[in-house]
Image (cartoon, grey):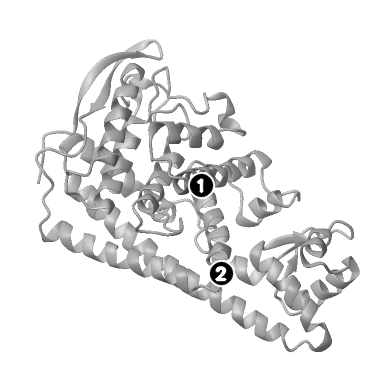
């Protein structure tokens, strides 16, 4: 169903010039969404795929281990969309005190995405609702360090921003004037919590994401936080027990379509076209995550079987391996502490695992060596090193 628009324009001052800023209408869309076959079938497929993903997370030997790695993969992809160049290994090296190979600022910004997500999920599990307060708290974590630390972390913007172009006058899109941000976000919060609109959670998450990106309530970090909002809504509604559904890879690979649909929806009100794209992404990403979870589980099981054939060193090697499963990057001292083994024993085990291509030493140094559980990281790494699309 085509609608004239999803909002109106208001003249505002930005960058020393007067521009037309877009002010979105409150959700849900009017007239109501058309749940014909074109939307119903993608919704059913996405819901089924999401159910498979939630089920497979419970079948893993230790879901927390997979969540640890997958959250970091999402953080990396989300940061990459914003232009950072760090790798999964860089992030995990940073977390164990190593020196990452990439730009340290990029790694810090990626680490901040992890911190923001953990904060949001922990608050939800403590019965704190998805709210503007929670989003501001997460934003403060997101911009705690790095290039965005001077961009009012944790506070809605108090000046005009824009998307694309060198100034508001030639921007691809100008969000609402800053004095309307609070009202727009209050409307969005009410929509997220509304129980009388009859909309499935997946549909609400798709609508809320686009509305958040349209409001662009912060000076920086809107894209990263807007993508995390999707996962928060699915976890809060109980569709996912663990935060392992992320659309950053899908948005990254379909970047031009993503931005075109955001703009087209604002202009024409064709929410159904956007939602079909969104739901197809949920299905595709959920199916991919199921495959990744199974492959990760198989890889861990195969390596344990290989290590079990090492003879008298098998017991120590399995303890080191388990520690690397839990944290795929580590140094000798850290592994010795976590396994209650001596440093010489850990060093000897790591040499054996390195010879069997299970782990890899990444510093090239004689002292302060750092090892990665390379086979497991290779599973998680899929999609994180694609050329920008």
Extreme-top residue of the structure: 16
- Residue 88, relative to residue 376: is it above or below? above
**SS label for mark 1:** helix
Q: Residue at x 40, y 23 (%)?
A: 161
**Left or right of residue 275: residue 352:** right
Label 1: few (<14), some or many (≥20) within 10 Å? Answer: few
Which residue is labeled 1 in the image? 122
Which residue is labeled 2 in the image? 62
- Residue 356, relative to residue 158: is it above or below? below
- Residue 7 placed where, x, y %? 19, 29
- Pick the front one: 366 or 32: 32
Whichever of labels 2 and 1 marks the residue nearer the N terminus, that label is 2
Q: Residue at x 61, y 34 (%)?
A: 146
**Left or right of residue 389: residue 325:** right
- Pick the front one: 189 or 277: 189
Find the distance from the CA under tag 2 to the CA under tag 1.
19 Å
- Residue 113 placed where, x, y %? 54, 44
């Amino acid at each position: 169903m085509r609608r004239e628009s999803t909002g109106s324009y208001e003249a505002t001052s930005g960058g020393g010039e007067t521009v037309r800023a877009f002010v979105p209408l409150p959700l849900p869309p009017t007239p109501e969404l058309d749940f014909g076959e074109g939307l119903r079938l993608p919704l059913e497929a996405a819901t089924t795929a999401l159910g498979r993903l939630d089920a497979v997370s419970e079948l893993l030997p230790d879901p927390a281990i997979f969540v640890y790695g997958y959250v970091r993969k999402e953080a990396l992809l989300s940061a990459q969309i914003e232009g950072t160049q760090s790798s999964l290994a860089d992030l995990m090296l940073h977390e164990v005190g190593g020196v990452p190979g990439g730009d340290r600022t990029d790694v810090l910004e990626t680490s901040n995405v992890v911190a923001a997500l953990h904060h949001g999920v922990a608050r939800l599990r403590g019965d704190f609702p998805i709210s503007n307060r929670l989003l501001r708290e997460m934003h403060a974590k997101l911009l705690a360090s790095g290039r965005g630390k001077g961009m009012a972390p944790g506070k809605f913007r108090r000046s005009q921003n824009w998307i694309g172009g060198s100034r508001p006058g030639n921007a691809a899109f100008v969000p609402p004037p800053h004095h309307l941000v609070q009202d727009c976000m209050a409307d969005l919060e009410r929509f997220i919590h509304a129980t009388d609109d009859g909309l499935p959670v997946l549909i609400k998450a798709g609508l809320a994401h686009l509305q958040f990106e349209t409001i662009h309530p912060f000076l920086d970090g809107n894209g990263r936080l807007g993508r995390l909002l999707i996962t928060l809504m699915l976890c809060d509604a109980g569709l996912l027990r663990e935060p392992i559904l992320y659309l950053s890879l899908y948005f990254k690979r379909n970047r031009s379509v993503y931005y075109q649909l955001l703009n087209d929806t604002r202009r024409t009100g064709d929410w159904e076209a956007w939602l079909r794209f969104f739901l197809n992404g949920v299905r595709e990403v959920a199916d991919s995550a199921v495959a990744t979870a199974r492959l990760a589980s198989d890889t861990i099981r195969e390596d344990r079987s290989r290590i079990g054939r090492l003879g008298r060193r098998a017991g120590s090697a399995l303890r080191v391996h388990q520690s690397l499963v839990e944290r795929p990057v580590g140094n000798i001292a850290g592994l010795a502490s976590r396994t209650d083994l001596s440093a010489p024993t850990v060093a000897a085990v790591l040499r054996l695992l390195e010879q069997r291509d299970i782990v890899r030493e990444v510093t090239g140094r004689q002292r302060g060596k750092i090892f990665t559980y390379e086979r497991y990281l290779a599973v998680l790494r899929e999609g994180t090193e694609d050329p920008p699309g």
